[in-house]
């Protein structure tokens, strides 16, 4: 009985791990559906649920993230298309067939007031304290079929948010956004970082009227981050 039970238990554990990974991968897709629906229908309650869902995803709480994102989509009258994976045993590829991490290069990046049709609009280095939200856009070239890039937001020397985004093609446009309160004036920086921790690109900007080079670093405790990532493929 023990010899039979152990392989079965191992298969269940591997299957659960594979399912958790797939759930985590589906969260950005659900969030993308939220953003597309919100462009057509304004719903503050749904927008809040979508933001909460992606924050839960960033914290590693993938089951709660999917549930929250799904609630947001339901308020918008949309049924999420991300399918929860069934129970399946993950199989290791033969030697020499393991996937290599994709090598990424940022070919274009910008900080902007918004994103329209997968392109940054009203780019700059100085933004109004009353803007409310700033976007970081990156266009990435990848040597592989898939990879990941992380946007890291800093207010002065303090890390405010970290958003990991999938790269799913040889040339891929993706972005994240950061909520900015009126009192958060000063110098900001956002970096695009590879999975190995290499800074591939960065942009410095300021909130307020002072140039970036003359803005003093932030002081006091770091406020709680509010992050809204979104991902879109480039259409050729």
Image: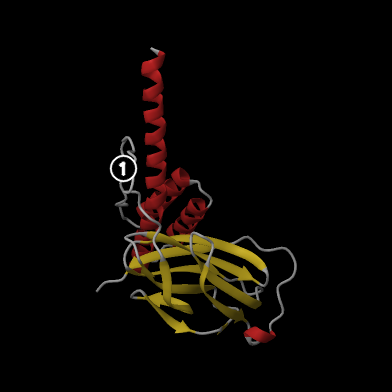
Position above or below: 24 against 92 = below
Q: Kindly state the secondary structure of the residue where label 1 is placed.
A: loop
Q: What residue is pinned by disc 1?
A: 94
Q: Which residue is drawn at 41% across and 52% down?
A: 69
Judge the density around disc 1: few (<14), some (14-19), many (≥20) Cα neighbours within 10 Å: few
Q: Decide if residue 41 is in sight here.
A: no
Q: Is residue 82 above or below residue 51?
A: above
> Residue 193 versus residue 39: which sits nearer the camera?
193
Q: In this view, does 161 lie above or below 132?
A: above
* Image position, residue 39 (x, y; %): 36, 69
Q: Residue furthest front?
A: 96
Quick one: quadrant of the N terminus? Answer: top left
Which residue is depicted at the point 41% across and 21% down?
6
Image quarter of residue 175: bottom left
Q: In this view, does 47 lie to the left or right of 161?
A: left
Q: Which residue is depicted at the point 38% across and 29% down? A: 12
Q: Front-most of 92 and 154?
A: 92
Which residue appears farthest toward the top when viewing the image? Answer: 1
Q: Quadrant of residue 203?
A: bottom right
> Exactly how many numbered labels are in the figure?
1
* 109 to the left or right of 202: left
- Residue 227 seen anywhere in this rendered image of the structure: yes
The quarter of the rendered structure image containing the C terminus is: bottom left
Give percent across and percent down for residue 11: 37, 29
Which is nearer the eye, 96 or 127?
96
Picture coordinates of residue 75, whole percent (x, y): 38, 54
| Residue depicted at 58% across the width and 71% down the height | 180
Residue that extends furthest to the right in the rendered view of this protein: 220
How far across and how far down the image is residue 54, in percent? 47, 56
Q: Is 96 positioned to the left or the right of 210 in the image?
A: left
């Amino acid at each position: 009985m023990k010899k039979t039970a152990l392989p079965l238990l191992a298969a269940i554990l591997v299957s659960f791990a594979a399912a958790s990974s797939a759930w985590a991968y589906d969260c950005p897709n659900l969030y993308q559906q939220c953003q597309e629906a919100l462009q057509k229908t304004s719903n503050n309650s749904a927008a809040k649920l979508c933001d909460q869902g992606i924050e839960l995803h960033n914290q590693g709480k993938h089951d709660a993230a999917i549930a929250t994102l799904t609630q947001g989509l339901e308020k918008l009258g949309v049924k999420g298309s991300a399918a929860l994976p069934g129970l399946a045993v993950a199989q290791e590829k033969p030697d020499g067939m393991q996937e290599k991490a994709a090598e990424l290069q940022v070919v274009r990046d910008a900080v902007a007031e918004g994103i329209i049709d997968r392109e940054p609009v009203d780019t700059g280095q100085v933004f109004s304290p009353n803007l409310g939200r700033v976007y970081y856009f990156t266009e990435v070239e990848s040597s592989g079929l898939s990879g990941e890039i992380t946007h890291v937001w800093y207010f002065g020397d303090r890390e405010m948010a970290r958003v990991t985004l999938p790269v799913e093609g040889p040339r891929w446009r993706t972005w994240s956004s950061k909520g900015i309160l009126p009192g958060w004036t000063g110098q900001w920086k956002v970096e695009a970082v590879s999975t190995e921790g290499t800074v591939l690109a960065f942009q410095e900007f300021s909130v307020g009227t002072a140039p970036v080079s003359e803005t003093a670093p932030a002081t006091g405790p770091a406020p709680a981050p509010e992050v809204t990532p979104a991902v879109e493929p480039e259409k050729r």
